[in-house]
Image (spheres, grey):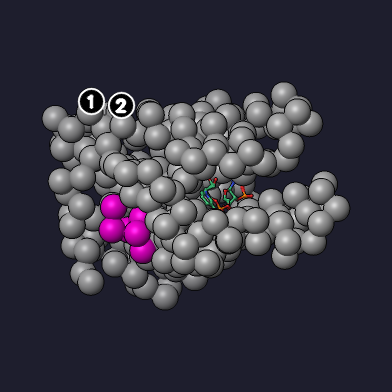
């Protein structure tokens, strides 16, 4: 489907792999120019080069650690120098650890909040004034269905997700008069490096096999499988497009039917 995004500019966090990389790919295929950010310079540069040349779009890599207070402003300012404006922001950087609640340290909670919540808050705060000036924009926060349906072994990420759903809903209301839409994509378990690392750690700490630990999750999913990053990337691109222009403050859940609530 042509999403009507040709020649737009998207800034994507967590873009070197996983859901951020898949979203960057889906947007590049629609003719969107890319600003990619994550910490790892090498993987980010490779990603920008590959997506730029495969799709004939401009793609720049801006390495940054989004847990650092001023990083978001620096990334956005560099992106504005390169492109003059940002039409789309996709927040996908996140790396919350899991484990048994009473064994998780303060640091695990703090790290989750610093990157996933504050990284997203700071990125949104940095792009919004430019979007208001340009009288339009699209923000997609890649959140996660544990924000609505907390899993006991994934509570730092679930808490960050719940906070981001509230932020997405609230900011959307403020920005609607400026023609800026803000939505959340709520994936269920998706086969990315983060998921694999999480399963490895949970298996190690419980003395079970990775397959058994993963089965705890897939057996709750009516579709009985993990999602692929590519299918989530296409949904994020849809949320960033004109086709979703009347959606704001919404949460698009794509978790194979796991979440049972209505609305
Ligand atoms: N995979 C799932 O099952 C799933 C399900 C629901 C929601 N989610 C959410 O989706 C988001 C992306 O997850 P994913 O599975 O794609 O993870 P991933 O494969 O581990 O990718 C995470 C991305 O974030 C970047 N990143 C990590 N720490 C960073 C930091 N301090 N500063 C800047 N960038 C940083 C990583 O690059 P560098 O390491 O190079 O910085 C990488 O590009 C996360 O918020 C996650 O909670 C994932």
Name the quarter where the C terminus is drawn. Answer: top left
Placement of 146 over or under 6, stated as above or below = above
Q: Position of residue 222 (x, y in %)?
A: 47, 62
Q: Nearer the viewer, mark 2 or mark 1?
A: 2
Q: Residue at x 29, y 67 (%)?
A: 30
Helix, strand or loop at mark 2: helix
Q: Quadrant of residue 190?
A: bottom right
Q: Report if residue 37 is visible in the image.
A: no
Q: Report if residue 10 is visible in the image.
A: yes
Q: Is residue 136 left or right of residue 24?
A: left
Placement of 140 over or under 31, stated as above or below = above
Disc 2 + disc 1, Cβ < 8 Å: yes
Q: Residue at x 23, y 40 (%)?
A: 248
Residue holding disc 2: 170
Q: Is residue 182 left or right of residue 154?
A: left
Q: Quadrant of residue 43?
A: bottom right
Placement of 57 over or under 260, stated as above or below = below
Chief secondary structure of the magenta span? helix
Q: Residue at x 49, y 70 (%)?
A: 50
Disc 1 crowd rating (10 Å Cα; few below 14, some 14-19, many 20+) is few
Residue holding disc 1: 174
Q: Residue at x 33, y 49 (%)?
A: 252
Q: Is residue 159 left or right of residue 166?
A: right
Disc 2 crowd rating (10 Å Cα; few below 14, some 14-19, many 20+) is few
Q: Specify start and end residues of the magenta stretch as a single range.
A: 234-239
Name the quarter where the N terminus is drawn. Answer: bottom left
Q: Position of residue 213 (x, y in %)?
A: 71, 57
Number of marks:
2
Q: Position of residue 161 (x, y in %)?
A: 49, 37
Q: Give the CA distance from mark 2 to mark 1.
A: 7 Å
Assess whether residue 170 is covered by the magenta stretch.
Answer: no
């Amino acid at each position: 489907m042509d999403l009507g995004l040709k020649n737009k500019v998207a800034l994507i966090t967590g873009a070197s792999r996983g859901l951020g990389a898949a979203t960057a790919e889906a947007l590049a295929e629609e003719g969107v120019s890319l600003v990619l950010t994550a910490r790892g310079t090498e993987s980010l540069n490779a990603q920008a080069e590959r997506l730029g040349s495969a799709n004939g779009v401009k793609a720049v890599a801006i390495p940054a650690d989004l847990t650092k207070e001023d990083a978001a402003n620096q990334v956005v300012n560099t992106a504005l120098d390169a492109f003059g404006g940002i039409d789309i922001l996709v927040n996908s950087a996140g790396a919350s650890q899991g484990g048994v609640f009473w064994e998780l340290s303060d640091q695990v909670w703090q790290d989750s909040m610093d990157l996933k919540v504050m990284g997203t808050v700071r990125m949104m705060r940095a792009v919004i004034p430019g979007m208001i000036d340009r009288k339009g924009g699209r923000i997609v926060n890649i959140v996660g269905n544990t924000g609505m349906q907390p899993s006991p072994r994934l509570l730092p990420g679930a808490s960050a997700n719940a906070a981001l759903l509230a932020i997405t809903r609230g900011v959307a209301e403020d920005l609607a008069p400026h023609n800026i839409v803000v939505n959340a994509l709520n994936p269920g378990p998706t086969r990315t490096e983060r998921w694999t690392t999480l399963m490895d750690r949970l298996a190690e700490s419980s003395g079970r096999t990775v397959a058994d630990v993963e089965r705890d999750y897939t057996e709750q999913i009516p579709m009985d499988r993990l999602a692929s990053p590519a299918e989530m990337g296409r949904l994020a691109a849809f949320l960033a497009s004109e086709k979703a222009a009347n959606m704001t403050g919404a949460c698009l859940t794509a978790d194979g039917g796991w979440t049972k609530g209505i609305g």
